[in-house]
Image (tube, coloured by chain):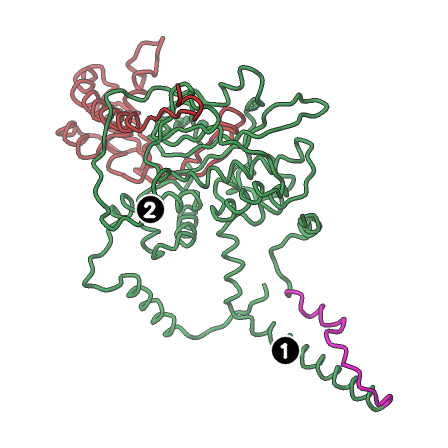
Chain colours: A red, B green
Amino acid sequence: MPDALPPDQPNAARRRWMAVLARADIDELGDRLGALPPYRVLRGPEAGLVMVRGRTGGGGAPFNLGEMTTTRCTVRTDTGFVGHAYVAGRNERLAQLAALADALLQDPIQQDRLLEDVIEPLAATQQARRDTVAAKAAATRVQFFAMRNMRS
Amino acid sequence: MAYVTVKGGEQAIDNAHAWLAEERRGDRTVQELTLAQIEQQLGRSVDRAMGEGSLYDRELAALAVKQAQGDLIEAAFLLRAYRTTLPRFAHSLPIETATMQIRRRISAVFKDLPGGQVLGPTYDYTHRLLDFDMAHSDARTSDEAVSTMPRVPDILGHEGLIEPDGNGEAEPGDLTRQPLSFPATRDVRLQALARGDEGFLLALGYSTQRGYGGTHPFAGEIRMGEVAVEIEPPELGFAIDIGDITVTECQMVNQFKGSKTTPPQFTRGYGLVFGFCERKAMAMALVDRAMRAEELGEEVTAPAQNVEFVLYHSDNIEATGFVEHLKLPHYVDFQSELQNVRRLQREVALTAERAEAVCGQDTPPPLAGGSWGQGAVPPSSPLPPTSSREGRGRFSP
């Protein structure tokens, strides 16, 4: 199934919604998707591992840091769209719903509505969470003075 | 192996395990711990189990901590065992710590570094007094957010004062697939350190500060926070973001006199670990730098500089396996040792009797004869590699 996206940025939109779905709260995603259309599970949901890599010195050659659990799922809607999901952790239901959402979002007829009703609100929740952390971090920002400077 | 198979004792073993379960649960009038409580309120234990278990999954790590009654090496062991039951889907693209959502970021070398110093949820500057109130601190926030933060090596790097990260996109070695072999390249060393025992690395890092392979370290930067993990599944053909993990990174900056080919500049040791494990990240960076001694033309004299010594002993799962295997039945071995000692004692007594009979002199019997040592060698010990024994003489300061 071809991506329903312009060829100049073939995957940018899809990458964004997949990133949002991977971080979604399962209950919120379920609520926002509402009644699910008919679909078939092609693979999974199954738990497995991803070997996380870092870079030597932060920017150099890659090395293997350690593994993380990941759950993947692939579904096909009755309308013929195939959706994939890889999500951190072992939540099989989240992987399945994320894969279904990925399939539905590729349907040009549904895409705008789903972006507005599902992805944007989830993204807002996630951004709010990040903002809270950033604000807490900012409250611990310090200005150290060397003793010599303290006199001036 | 030097231990022997035994049979029997099933009932006793069942009873022991039942009692263990009872002990683990403790007094049933006390509420049972939930995994969420462990994950949320014993986060540092969870982080350490994940790091040394080399498996990032907070919920599983919480379960491991609970099942192990808080024994973190046992918890790491449980996670290592669990991971073998799962297939590996992919490896990630290298995580970009430069784009981390910062929770903590400090530098001991620049007080006014771009992006500022962010203390985050730290124990630094606490009084280390037991807080009998354990008052619930309300989280305070600030209106201004923390923005992107350049990495300290990049700041120094512009002036050519510090060695660059280097490059290369070679497929890194993987200790979960290939056993450790030597010479071990830096990618393999970093993997081993990342899953190594915090206590062991801490002691080794400390030893370098005390002069056993000193590197004059400065904590160039320590940062902790969340980074996105991306993989490129073949069925998609492009990279996707699968979620965030918490990591701690340490850039240790070290003096370097320079060599024939390299001008004097700062060198670096690198630490990167799962979760908020600052002490481990710092120790890892110290030991990483120490192990680069040979590469940088420094004399290899100390344990922390000896790559084989460090890597063969940093893994606490292997270490606990070999130390604790001593509990397994060694009955046959010990019987042969016992016979050995009895024979030697008889020989010594006999020699003494003869000497007395011949000379009538009062010479002390020659204790600890030459043959004693042969019998006392650990019988067919499977682990310590013969090659590491050659290095042993070098450890003396």
Instruction: State which region is magenta.
Output: B358-378
Quadrant into which the N terminus of chain B falls: bottom right
**Callout 2 secondary element:** helix
Q: Quadrant location of residue A13? A: top left
Q: Secondary structure at mark 1?
A: helix
Between tags 2 and 1, which lies in front? Answer: 1
Of the two numbered discs 2 and 1 on the same chain, state the one appearing first in sequence: 2
- Residue B364, above or below B304: below
Q: Nearer the viewer, residue B185 or B121?
A: B121
Binning the other alpha carbons within 10 Å of mark 2 as few (below 14), some (14 to 19) or many (20 upward) gives many
Disc 2: host chain = B
Residue A151 appears in the picture as rendered: yes
Identify the residue shown where x is 54% and y is 58%.
B322
Residue B163 in picture, x, y percent from top left = 58, 23
Q: Is residue B96 visible?
A: no
Say whether mark 1 and mark 2 are on the same chain.
Answer: yes
Using the image as rendered, state which of residue B275 and residue B140 is in the foreground: B140
**Which quadrant of the view contains residue B241?**
top left
Using the image, tell me which numbered label, if any, was put on residue B60.
2
The residue labelled by disc 1 is: B338
Q: How packed is label 1: few (under 14 Cα within 10 Å), some, or many (20 or more)?
A: few
Residue A28 is left or right of residue A13, and the answer is left
Q: Is residue B370 magenta?
A: yes
Chain where mark 1 sits: B
In the displayed structure, does residue A86 sit left or right of residue B286?
left
* Labels in figure, total: 2
Name which residue lies at 51% across and 67% down: B328
In the picture, measured across the screen, residue A118 lies left or right of residue B64, that is left
Amino acid type at mark 2: Leu
